Amino acid sequence: MFLTGILILWILLCHFAGIREQFPYPQSFDGKQVSCTGRVCQIEAGADFWYVYADHIQADFMEEVSERLKVRAILEEPADCAYGNWVQICGKLTLAEAPSNDGAFDRLFYQQTERLLFSMKNARLTVRDGRQNPLLQWMYEVRRICMRHLEQIFDEQDAGILAAMLLGDKSRLAEEIRDWYQVGGIAHVLAISGLHISLFGMALYHILRKLGISFVVSSGIAGNFMLFYAVFTGAGVSTRRVMIMFLLFLGAQCLGRTYDLLSALSAAVFLLLFDYPILLFSSGFQMSVSAVAAIGGFYPILKKHYGSYISSGAAIQLFMLPCVLWHSFSFPLYSVMLNSMVIPLLPFVLAGGGSALLFSFFSLKAASYPAAAVHGVLNLYSCLCRVSLELPFSQMIFGRPKLWSILLYYVILSAGAVWLLQKKQKKVCYLVFVFMAIFFLKRTEPKAFSVTFLDVGQGDGIVLRDDTGVTMLCDGGSSSVSNVGKYRILPYLRYHGIDRLDYVFLSHMDMDHINGVRELLERQTCSIKIKNLVLPAIKNPDETYLEIERLAAGQKIAVHKMREGDCICTRSMMLTCLAPKAGDTSKNKNETSMVLHVKYKSFDVMLMGDLEKEGEKDLIRRKKLPQLLEGGNKIEVLKAGHHGSKGATSEELLDILKPQMAVLSYGKGNRYGHPAPETIERLEKANCPAVSTEKCGEITFFCLKNEKILVRYGKNVIK
């Protein structure tokens, strides 16, 4: 239990220590054409591009860096180089960006864990030294041959799954399959793991021993074979952890010593972190370590009271739960049940897939028999994931837990385990401990009104929450970020533990305002439930408008229409629609945008949609704006219309509203030239400071119960 406690401490430090290795990024050269030289250390064939990785980097535009740091050349044509070649790479230097929204994938840190310094797009390679690493090049060629054989005997979907399971190559894994496995809680079967070592390495070792071969020779053969397989499949962090533990097992066999799982795990963790401390923050490292720690420390306790069948899955899931919630913000409720059906069949899949691959080198017909059986099991996996998604509460969204709640969770879980050891007949009572511990992991937000302007690139996405938990989304789309719902909006909602949108407003039907919402409507299995959809009340709506209506109706979401004067009130917040007025048509989408005034106590926000000059004039002419400012009210936050375009946010509008701050939502380097210099000049003339999602990332305004206003920025560029 002491070693288990040390492992828990490591994982917590991983989350919160905040010590990350600093990489020598050439910031001033981002987006510029550069040239560097290096040695080819990895070659990958993607769906659309080829990727060549080089280490031992030398470049005139930056100081000397570690030989182990790499650059990635992205090529449109197959790479004409080999492992070990020294090459010159010319291309557009591209640095990864840190996440600008809560919950977004941290690509910058992921590349750090891979020792990747930067990428070079549209790259050109020139071989300067033809010396090769024959072993690595041979492995690369064998992997390509194996991939071609998998594609011959399996359909595209199955071939992608087996390439991940057997070859460690996830480049051909269908995105839909990846999503199903992740949501179902069985994504771990797609990684090279301890099960591979058990199946291949341990099987080989025991066969050799059965043949009468000595401990030392059997260990040597099995160990070298698995080392070869680890390098062959890419030697990821989980694979390296497993290999260290397997070699320690073989060493114990040779020396006649007892193999202790937790001691071997501790040694593996120490060696991995000593070599590269930044792995402490890696989700793959955390998941791998916590799963084995659960098997070695927690599972034996549960097994005595609940039996091995239930206890193995429950121990792993309970022990890993804080890590899972920290990285994915939700827990697949039926994952224990799914894993109890999936894992027993996994050795069959690996053995059957490996056999089919081996047979295919001699006879495609012989390979077809195990391939058909494996196809049936993989279909069963997909079917189980799909069925689990349709069940109620398939995804329990907790949000990212706080530090104190993780500490309390492990304290309660450990105290309950100790108590269970002493009170052998109190099995039901321990379940109470478990549910108490899980309860504390649910993220709780401060009871305050907040409005968040998400960084969605060139588009709009605004999240409103009042102090009672009512949550609204105003627009959600982008013309510069693909799948903005999946990669920007959903992660933010899940990070904050939001599993319900009480209202979703669409100001108008431009794609940069609606395509993310359309994803949410189409992905109602994502566990973010939409209760009400609010559209502008206009005459002669276009086909996009009608399509959104039909999509919402198909999901049994209530659809409402808002026009000038309509209000939606919660206990503490009021939204008033200022436009469109009755009789407006959809001929000019921007000029008939829905304009909302949001009021919480004395805090006022104006959401202008894409309203431009003519729409603003009409709003002013109807004398609706002065009524908002009666009694000394002022507009604290103005969401500038149409992303800060030249024709929006007129001087006359600013003179009437007198906003305290303006928010501009636009994408970096957009082709529209947003924000227009004229708009920035008008804001400066009106003494209205402006902040943008492009520069600041997400921008959140909090209005506390004492009406104090706090502002937080996603990129932490403004303190």
Image: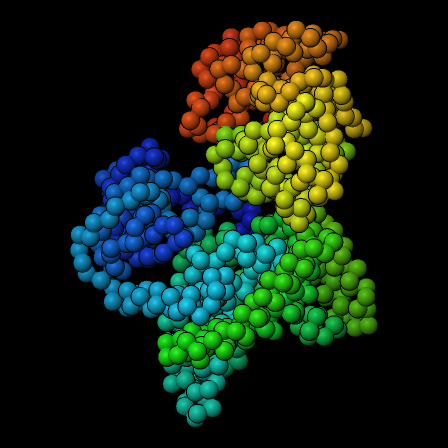
The residue closer to the viewer here, 308 or 664, is 664
Give how far across and how far down residue 117 sits, in percent.
36, 46
Give how far across and how far down residue 335 sits, in percent.
66, 61
Which residue appears farthest toward the front when viewing the image?
Answer: 540
**Residue 141 seen in this snapshot:** yes
Residue 282 falls left or right of residue 330 = left
Q: For the point 75% across and 36% down, which residue is it?
A: 558
Q: Is residue 319 above or below residue 623?
A: below
Give how far across and how far down residue 699 sits, in percent.
57, 29
The residue closer to the viewer here, 319 or 107, is 107
Give how far across and how far down residue 43 sits, in percent.
33, 57
The residue closer to the viewer here, 355 or 129, is 355
Count how many numbered circles sit on residues in the image. Answer: 0
Residue 495 falls left or right of residue 374 = right
Q: For the point 28% across and 41% down, which residue is it?
A: 91
The residue closer to the viewer here, 414 or 657, is 657
Residue 54 falls left or right of residue 435 = left
Q: How is the image coloured?
A: rainbow
**Residue 232 seen in this snapshot:** no
Quadrant hosting residue 316: bottom right
Q: For the point 69% across and 70% down, which residue is it?
A: 311
Which residue appears farthest toward the left when viewing the image?
Answer: 129
Quadrant that contains the N terminus: bottom right
Q: Is residue 695 above or below residue 550?
A: above
Q: For the point 26% across and 38% down, which residue is it?
A: 34
Quadrant hosting residue 560: top right
